[in-house]
Image (cartoon, helix red, strand yellow):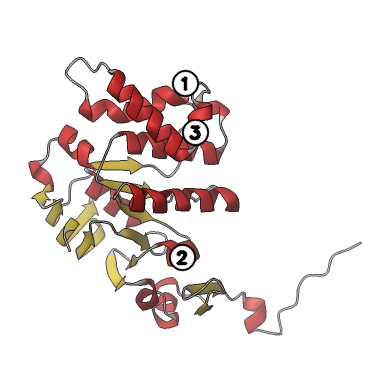
Amino acid sequence: MKEAIHTKQLGYSYGDLRVLEALSFSVYRGDFFIIIGPNGSGKTTLLKCISGILRPRTGGLEILGAPVHAYSRKSLARSIALVPQTAPVDFPFRVTEVVLMGRSPHLGILGVEHEEDLSIAHRAMEFTGVASLARRKLDQLSGGERQRVMIARAICQDPEIILLDEPTASLDLAHQVRVMDLMERLRHEKKVTVLMVSHDINLAALYGNRLMLLKEGRILSLGAPSEVLTFQTLEEAYGCPLLVDKSPLGDFQRVTLVPQKFIDPGIKETSRRP
């Protein structure tokens, strides 16, 4: 299988603080690759290194078979699009204008959009279900709508790889599923490689074909969900009691946190006054 992203002994530090330590892994073209792990494990920093926002301090990073340093910022933006964790709410632009920003890496020196750019933006809005919001301003939209607009902007870049930093973190259940289904469609219909950071282990189990579990900047486990989401591995990563069983939806892992009150029967719920 061809590699979309390949790292070899990649490391990064903020001053003396080592955040990523000797990471070696590959994301293959067509993957729905999800990075999970506890807070402070280096997930977002890794995403920033891959997107070009940060430059790795040590090791190698290849994007679509070429070293990342061989790309100009503009050429890298033609290959990779990044969807941030939350869309800005104080962005004084209409939806169409925001989506069209995704065409920037493809525009000439004057930065003028042409009819084809408008057509690509419209198709991206149709694909993400925000075409009816085209004339609305970003600050007039719900969190789920804003997130789909940002995904439309990423699609408008026409990238081969889309990176997402916890895209469902602030969304309700319905919008979480819509965003994840949208990325699944993008992967299958447009053949885009999807790399996502997520705190939601159960969503990762349902959608990811390959998972990587980070802890303290190192790879604790990498592989299919059934290989990564085991009781022993998750307990080592998160240090809390949990159960891992099969989802009623099929051959997927389901992870359930176990509150302390179910472990220590001596702990009683505080009674409430009427």
Label 3 vs 1, first from the N-terminus: 1
Residue 65 image offset from top left, x and y in percent: 11, 53
Residue 267 image offset from top left, x and y in percent: 71, 79
Mark 3 in CB contact with mark 1 (< 8 angstroms): no
Mark 2 in CB contact with mark 3 (< 8 angstroms): no
Which three-letter amino acid code belongs to the residue tagged 3? Val
Residue 59 image offset from top left, x and y in percent: 12, 58
Q: For label 3, count other residues whose C-alpha is less than 10 Å away and answer few (under 14), some (14-19) or many (20+).
A: some
Q: Is residue 150 left or right of residue 2?
A: right
The answer to whether residue 112 is visible is yes
Which three-letter amino acid code belongs to the residue tagged 2? Leu
**Above or below — where is 16 with respect to 210?**
above
**Above or below — where is 168 with respect to 254?**
above
Determine the secondary structure under disc 3: loop
Which three-letter amino acid code belongs to the residue tagged 1? Pro
Q: Is residue 85 left or right of residue 101?
A: right
Q: For label 2, count other residues whose C-alpha is less than 10 Å away and answer few (under 14), some (14-19) or many (20+).
A: some
User: In percent of the image, x 62 and y 77: which residue is there?
Assistant: 260
The CA distance from mark 2 to mark 3 is 25 Å
Determine the secondary structure under disc 2: helix
Q: Is residue 126 left or right of residue 221?
A: right
Residue ID for mark 2:
206
Label 2 vs 3, first from the N-terminus: 3
Residue ID for mark 3:
130
Q: In the displayed orientation, state which residue is furthest to the right.
A: 274
Q: Which mark is residue 92?
A: 1
Q: Which quarter of the rendered picture does the N terminus lie within? A: bottom left
User: In percent of the image, x 47 and y 22: which residue is there?
Assistant: 94
User: In percent of the image, x 43 and y 24: which residue is there?
Assistant: 96
Q: For label 1, count other residues whose C-alpha is less than 10 Å away and answer few (under 14), some (14-19) or many (20+).
A: few
User: In percent of the image, x 53 and y 47: which residue is there?
Assistant: 170
Image quadrant in which you'd find residue 82: top left
